Amino acid sequence: MALYNFKKITVVPSVKDFIDLTLSKTQRKTPTVIHKNYQISRIRHFYMRKIKFTQQNYHDRLSLILTDFPKLDDIHPFYADLMNVLYDKDHYKLALGQINIAKNLIDNVAKDYVRLMKYGDSLYRCKQLKRAALGRMCTILKRQKQSLEYLEQVRQHLSRLPSIDPNTRTLLLCGYPNVGKSSFINKITRADVEVQPYAFTTKSLFVGHMDYRYLRWQVVDTPGILDHPLEERNTIEMQAITALAHLRAAVLYVMDVSEQCGHTVEEQLELFKNIQPLFANKPLIIVANKSDVKKIDELTEEQKKIFADLMAEGITVTETSTLTEEGIIKVKTEACDRLLAHRVDSKMKGKKVNDLLNRLHLAVPSKRDEKERLPWIPEGASKRRKMEVDAPKRKTERDLELELGDDYVLNLQKHWDLMNESEKQDLIPEIWEGHNIADYIDPEIMQKLEQLEKEEELKQMAGEYDSDSESEDEEMKDIRKLAIQIREKKKMQILMSREKQTKKGPKMPRTAKKMLKKVKKMMKNSQQDMNRMGKKGEADRHVFDLKPKHLFAGKRKMGRTDRR
């Protein structure tokens, strides 16, 4: 069976847009110039080409609509029934049939007028035949206005439908309105279905996805169902019935034990019995929701008996609360496990399994004698196993963290395997340029420093560092004065050179200076035209027509001006 991607259906244009698009494309893609003095065969071919091109354009667009829309006989029965519920199967088929008839009529009109075009003996007659052909094609399409509008509405609605895979692992939620189905799907999946404290908040099917046992599961939230005959059910309820009838899923029938939904437990059980034929050959779990308000134990004896009878029939009843999340995971795991087991059983009963089992062969060795042969385990392995069993359980870092709380500090050095146990808590050496810094640190350096400082103090007190100016001779004094003068002169020269070099603007590299000259020159050239026009006012503008058409063109012949 074909599975359609409804989101990729092309847009169905309105009749006016359809005709405008086709005729404008014909005008753009075909030749537009023809003269009466051409050979009649050329004139006929010119107009034949226009008719054929328009017909092909209509044919392609209408064929695309027919192929894109799903055929109800080809798709899965779930989608076929859902489309019947939402759009009315007869109306849908009638609209597509009308489009198909219109396509065939347009093809026939084009064929007839191409045949008639062979008898056109002048440009005027050929043109009138072309006009008649295009006009009839457009008239045929105008009659399909309602069908095209209906199909566009169907396309828009189809694109908004959730993509439900009818063959994958599915959990299906059903029950009365306002019992907590949407809250349940929001808890176990990544869906975000609207939840409100009134009935029929969910008006269509919603899908959420989750992972369980490394498999992707889809959870379908159906609109609420009321307890009345099938003929009286509306479109919203029929969507839920369609899903229950066609999807191979584990069914979760959600009940409101607290009766806050506005329906008693007895009414909910009556609905369950009414739709129970739809649960045939499907795993079924009854979810007693809103246990945070009222549990099954707090119900009356009659209501307790209802749930006891259901459990006696082999139906699983689980208490949950979407508010406190009590029992949610339990229901999810149980439903998934039961559906997996059910799918395996159904596959084992099928015909395909026999073909696979015929290819498999399980070899089981037969006993050669009655002698018992025990497994042999080496002594080392048995001792190690005994030591592992007898040894006390080592505390993990997580256990220590929980035990100590805020006082816990992660210390990975205690697990290091070193020859000397006392070295475990040593600081890690700091390496600089391949050398260990600790190797170059003298442990007695502080004592030596104190000794040096004491020696320095004694030398200062003895006056060893006091300079004796009288000891210098005259020659040394002259050298010092000369050195001071040289330094001052150097400083002055540096200041003078700096004053010469300083400019108002920032310093620029040579390449930038060249570029600056070029830019200034370009700016000057671009201003020339504006400067030239600067004397004129706004009203003095004049566009010169250097070669006026009426002076240089030849004499015109008789006939009207038709630019097309």
Image: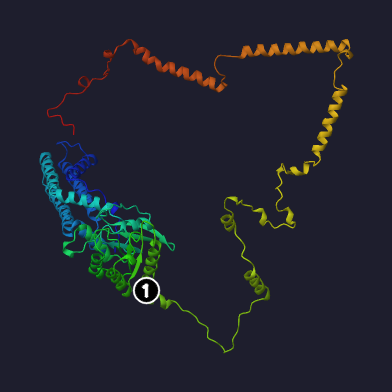
Q: Position of residue 535 (x, y in %)?
A: 33, 10
Would you call the spot at circle 1 few (<14 residues within 10 Å), some (14-19), or many (20 or more)? few
Q: Which residue is disc 1 drawn over?
A: 345
Question: Taking 463 as reference, is 546 left or right?
Answer: left
Question: Taking 532 as reference, is 375 left or right?
Answer: right
Q: Which residue is found at the position 41% from the left and 77% from the top?
A: 357
Q: Which residue is found at the position 26% from the left and 58% from the top?
A: 261
Q: Which residue is found at the position 71% from the left and 46% from the top?
A: 429
Residue 250 shows up from this direction? no
Height in image: 564 above or below 547? below
Question: Taking 395 as reference, is 443 left or right?
Answer: right
Of residue 110 and residue 420, the one placed in the foreground of this image is 420
Q: Position of residue 330 (x, y in %)?
A: 40, 64
Amino acid type at image mark 1:
Asp
Height in image: 532 above or below 206? above
What colour scheme governs how the chains and residues are painted in the rendered image of this protein? rainbow
Quarter of the rendering occupied by the N terminus: bottom left
Question: Taking 161 as reference, is 564 left or right?
Answer: left
Residue sitting at the far bottom: 370
Quarter of the rendering occupied by the C terminus: top left
Question: Helix, strand or loop at disc 1?
Answer: helix
Height in image: 219 above or below 46? below
Q: Position of residue 376 (x, y in %)?
A: 63, 79
